[in-house]
Image (cartoon, rainbow, N blue to C red):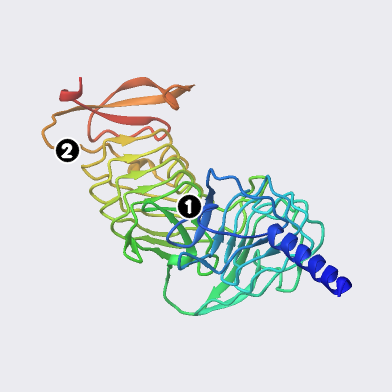
Amino acid sequence: MKKLLTIIIIVLIRLSICAQNTHILTNNDFEINEQGFVYKKNDTTLPEFNKLIIPDSINNIKIVGYGVDLLSNSNINKLVLPQGLKVIFNEAFAMQHIDTVILPQNLIYIGNRAFLGYNKPIVLPQPNKEDHLFLGWNDSIPAGSYYFGYKEERYIATFKYLKDSAYILKYDDILINNGEIIKCFYKGSNRIIIPGNINNERIKKIKSNTFYFTNWDGESMFNDLSEVSIEEGIESIGCNCFKDNLIQKLILPHSLKTIKEGAFYNNQLKSIRIEEGIDSIHALAFFNNKITSIKFPKSIVFIDECAFANNAFSEKNIPMLPIPEIKNKTFLYWQSFKKGRYIREAKNFEEIPVGQCQPGEKMDLNLGYKAVFKEDL
């Protein structure tokens, strides 16, 4: 009887230890957005645990993405991932002592060094996507191949879109934060439509580098968009957003206000229509395309240095400065400028004046231009 009691006590102690060393992720540990991305660690101190279970959902929100380096102070040797997980961000499970990693079936994105410190091979799954055919990881790596967590390279599932039309980006293709697309995980059709409203959430901005993929060394990789249509509602396109793609056809919305630095740098555009409403086009925005002509709307008041340099303008078709119109303001002239030193306090480059220009004058494509109004002097 004593022996049996002793065995029971030992079993209970071991079960207690196991329970103490297992942690199931909750909304008290991390923040989770409406899309199901676990992205920010709360200030609460996590308990000591060796086994982490990430449930399929938290507060009835399915978990589809797991954030950056969230467990840097933990010591996990067992990890259970949710079956609905599609995205693992950079260094998410770095420097742990995980003994086995099984990736979920429909995972489509693995960030740089996501499992840094894990030296065993991880089998890449074969995800499924409606109306798509899976081609491989990073274009050509087949499912069943080994992935090594220490590699300084992101892995993206590549698909072939099976319809003839352009593909409309869906809720699970991108990461949205406060009306801004901040990440894209889709690699399928080279003809895409970026909606201004997704799942009743209005999209106003596209963040820097969203459709510009690079490896760990900063080298461009598998950027092959040829046609991009941006729908109404979007007001800003971020720096290098579509850099180093193969875009030949571009449709911009009337709602667009700003195109940031290098947004369409090094593409294949031959023509472009800038709609009324846009007011600023920043440095190198359309640098190194094949544009032959362009007409600016009356709303434009700022064209930054080299925004349209290194294109295919003939001497006859070099862009001319427009007559900008702003309600209750009197236009005086265009101030041309070139960039000088970087001003840390302003987080921008110094603008060195070159001269005053009038509407109808041909631009020097290497300079920037700022509209000057009487009321601003």
Mark number, residue 274:
none
Choose between 169 and 64: the one closer to the eye: 64
Q: Residue at x 78, y 56 (%)?
A: 118
Tell me: 281 left or right of 267.
Answer: left
Helix, strand or loop at mark 1: loop
Choose between 115 and 127: the one closer to the eye: 115
State the separation of the CA atoms marked 1 and 2.
29 Å
Q: Which residue type carries mark 1? A: Phe
In this rendering, is residue 323 above or below 242?
A: above
Residue highlighted by disc 2:
325
Furthest-left residue in view?
328
Residue 312 x, y percent position in the rendering? 44, 47
Q: Quadrant of residue 145?
A: bottom right
Q: Quadrant of the C terminus?
A: top left
Tell me: 81 left or right of 30.
Answer: right
In this rendering, is residue 276 above or below 88?
A: above
Label 1–label 2 contact, CB within 8 A:
no
Check disc 2: other Cα within 10 Å, few if <14, some if 14-19, many if 20+: some
Choose between 86 and 155: the one closer to the eye: 86
Q: Residue at x 69, y 49 (%)?
A: 74
Q: Is residue 191 visible?
A: no
Query: Mark 1 or mark 2, which is nearer to you?
Result: 1
Check disc 1: other Cα within 10 Å, few if <14, some if 14-19, many if 20+: many
Tell me: 152 left or right of 171.
Answer: right
Residue 25 x, y percent position in the rendering? 58, 59
Residue highlighted by disc 1:
242
Q: Quadrant of the N terminus?
A: bottom right
Helix, strand or loop at mark 2: loop
Residue 13 x, y percent position in the rendering? 77, 62
Q: Residue at x 32, y 48 (%)?
A: 294
